[in-house]
Image (spheres, grey):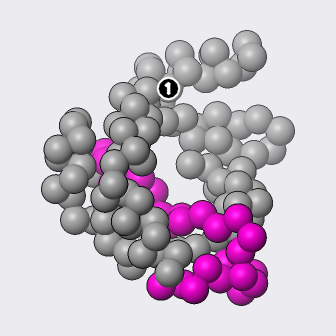
Amino acid sequence: MKNLEHSFRYYKSGKPSFIKISRLNYFVIDIKVEHIIAHIRSVIKYKWWRTSVLERDEYKCWYSGLICKFPEAHHNKAFNRIIKQYHIKSIEQALNCAELWDINNGVCMEKVIHRAHHDIWGW
């Protein structure tokens, strides 16, 4: 925990925005961005995007090619990167950002594979 607290201070000082724990890179997301992401995931438009991605991929995992028991939609270009790129500060701005809702920016992944992907590559 001490390393994590140090890393948050390191992040706020403007240094690189990742920490290294047990040979895995975890990207530290700004608290404000995380708050916006939580709101986005609660709106109907997000549920539409998620369902559209899963149906397009026929609930087959992009990585394994198998039908998912616990399907999740994964953004190829991360949520937090899109939010930072377009300087999104409100849910209204998010709803008007076409790149967030582009189903070609998403793939279906099995929940376990999705978590492993983010454990390796970060959030």
The part of the chain drawn in magenta is 56-84
Across and down, in percent, residue 119 comes to: 71, 50
Which residue corresponds to the image point at 83% horizontal and 39% vertical from the top-left?
22
Residue 45: image quadrant is bottom left
Residue that lies at the very extreme toward the right in this rendered image: 22
Neighbour tally class for label 1: few under 14, some 14-19, many 20 plus, Cα within 10 Å: some
Residue at the disc numbered 1: 11
Across and down, in percent, residue 36 comes to: 35, 37
Q: Specify the amino acid type for callout 1.
A: Tyr
Residue 52: image quadrant is bottom left
Which residue corresponds to the image point at 17% horizontal and 46% vertical from the top-left?
93
Horizontally, is 92 left or right of 63 in the view? left
Front one among 54 and 14? 54
Horizontally, is 28 left or right of 86 in the view? right
Front one among 112 and 84? 112
Question: How many numbered marks, from 0 up?
Answer: 1
- The reply to whether the magenta stretch includes residue 59 is yes
Residue that lies at the very extreme toward the front in this rendered image: 44
Looking at the image, residue 40 lies above or below residue 70: above
Front one among 9 and 104? 104
Across and down, in percent, residue 92 comes to: 17, 44
Which residue corresponds to the image point at 21% horizontal and 58% vertical from the top-left?
97
Q: Is residue 87 visible?
A: no
Horizontally, is 7 left or right of 77 in the view? right
Across and down, in percent, residue 34 comes to: 44, 35
- The reply to whether the magenta stretch includes residue 113 is no
Element on which disc 1 rests = helix
Image quadrant where one finds the N terminus: top right
Q: Is residue 108 visible?
A: yes
Horizontally, is 37 left or right of 97 in the view? right
